[in-house]
Image: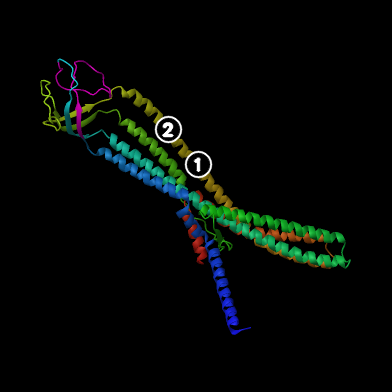
Amino acid sequence: MSENHRAGLRWMTIMLVVLTSLVQTSRAQSSADQKKTLTLEEAVDFALKNYPAVRASLERVTAAQAGVGLARTNYLPRADVVWQTNRATDNNITGLVLPQSIIAPISGPVPMATSNRSAWGSAAGLLFSWQPFDFGYRGATVGAARAARDQATAEASLTRLDVAIATVNAYLTVLAAQRTVLAADADVQRRETFDKAVRVLVDNQLRAGADGSRAGAELARARVNLARAQQREKISQAALTDILGLPDKSVEVVEGSLLAAAPDESPKTTPVTNNPVAEVQHARVEEAQAQVHILDRSYYPKLYLQSSVYGRGSGWDPTGKFEGGTTGLAPDRSNWAVGLTLTFPAFDIFAIRSRKAVESANERAESARYDQTLQDLTGQLRKAQASLEGARHVAEDTPVELDAARTTETQERSRYQAGLATLIDVADAQSLLVQAETDDALARLAVWQNLASVAASQGDLQPFLQLLHQKTQGGP
């Protein structure tokens, strides 16, 4: 082989190695981009920043705040400006036309005969109008806008709470599913080892063939349970990624201190009236009260201070003679006026009374719903606290259950090897062990989940997250 050929082969080998390295690096980066690792606190913060419902609720708050500004503009005076230029005939006629928007009015004398001749006409003016006082009507409309803003703000807080607690539940569900998979996988490994030992005994005719069949059946069942646990894990991960708004990525959860002993203290107790659910309903009561207040201020006179400056031009003289040319193209006669206008809707009292009866009934209904909301929240808090207490007791007992199950499984296998126990005894002991392993892991997660439920029942998840942070930092 020539030296040139050998050098070419070396260069090709080097290029293949470089390309392979680049491909592997690209794949590793792509895999890293598709996976996101989050602690529970980070997951909650991420969901609150990215979940569409949260963003939508914040925009509704912005819109409601703008509504308050819109209501305040009613205090401002109004100024209307007009300019008009036209070319028209002047065939005026004496008589009455009821108010409408089709036939244009004509000012000036009635001519003796009709004509198709047209002339220029123009008009320009400014009308200034201001309501100096309104007996509290505009203040009532601003109050209603504020009540709507407060309701939107409370609903945004409720949405944030719902998203936060849903994220916590989904996160803990993924952890629980993973621990179940680990327990099921350990069970499969134990049963595989035991199945091999049984088959050796059966092959050596030291045990009946039925033992081999039963051991195989137990192993198959354990594998089925493992497959189901893995299925639940994938489903729970999909639910978590959906809440986080990361459907195209795989989220890796961090156990941290969640599988350690939960803190003995509970989230600080706060009044149920601070719960966003109660705040939303209270805001609805205030909004209904604001509507009643508006109606209370509706049956009053409306006083307007008005002034007007205007001018007109016409191509016809006062006698109706056509002047021709560009006469009338611009205003040549002006006027001004200042006055007060008072309006009073005398017969609106009947409609206002009926509308007030409707709004008053709505207010009483919302008040009753508020009372029911407080009652329901109090009941939910008590249930959450009772569930937390029960979860703590369970978490205290599961380590004892696990130790006993491990000892039992070891003893039963030894007794089976010595011919003092049946295979059914070993299978039952192994089933008890996998259940104990699962119970022990899930019991600690259940305490954290119930801590979150207590915090959510009080309407604030921050105390729960503070307990978690203290536990992570090794605090008391």
Magenta stretch, overall SS: loop
Residue located 28% across and 41% down the image: 72
Where in the figure is residue 76, as x and y percent of width and height? 24, 39
Quarter holding residue 70: top left
Q: Amino acid at mark 2?
A: Asn
Q: Residue furthest right?
A: 205
Pick whichever of labels 2 and 1 is earlier in the sequence: 2
Q: Which residues are magenta?
A: 82-111
Locate the N terminus and report the quarter of the image it occupies.
bottom right
| Proximity of marks 2 and 1: CB atoms separated by less than 8 Å | no
Q: Position of residue 47 (x, y in %)?
A: 48, 54
Measuring 33% from the left and 39% from the top, which residue is drawn there?
143
Q: For residue 455, say whether it is visible.
A: no
The label shown at residue 375 is 1
Amino acid type indicated by mark 1:
Gln
- Whether residue 185 sits left or right of residue 450 in the image: it is right
Q: Is residue 256 above or below residue 122?
A: below
Secondary structure beneath label 2:
helix
Q: Nearer the viewer, residue 324 or 78?
A: 324
Separation of residues labelled 2 and 1 (CA atoms) = 20 Å
Q: Residue at x 33, y 33 (%)?
A: 294
Query: Viewed as shown, does residue 134 lie left or right of 251?
Result: left
Name the residue beneath numbered marker 2.
362
Q: Does the magenta-highlighted stretch encompass residue 98?
A: yes
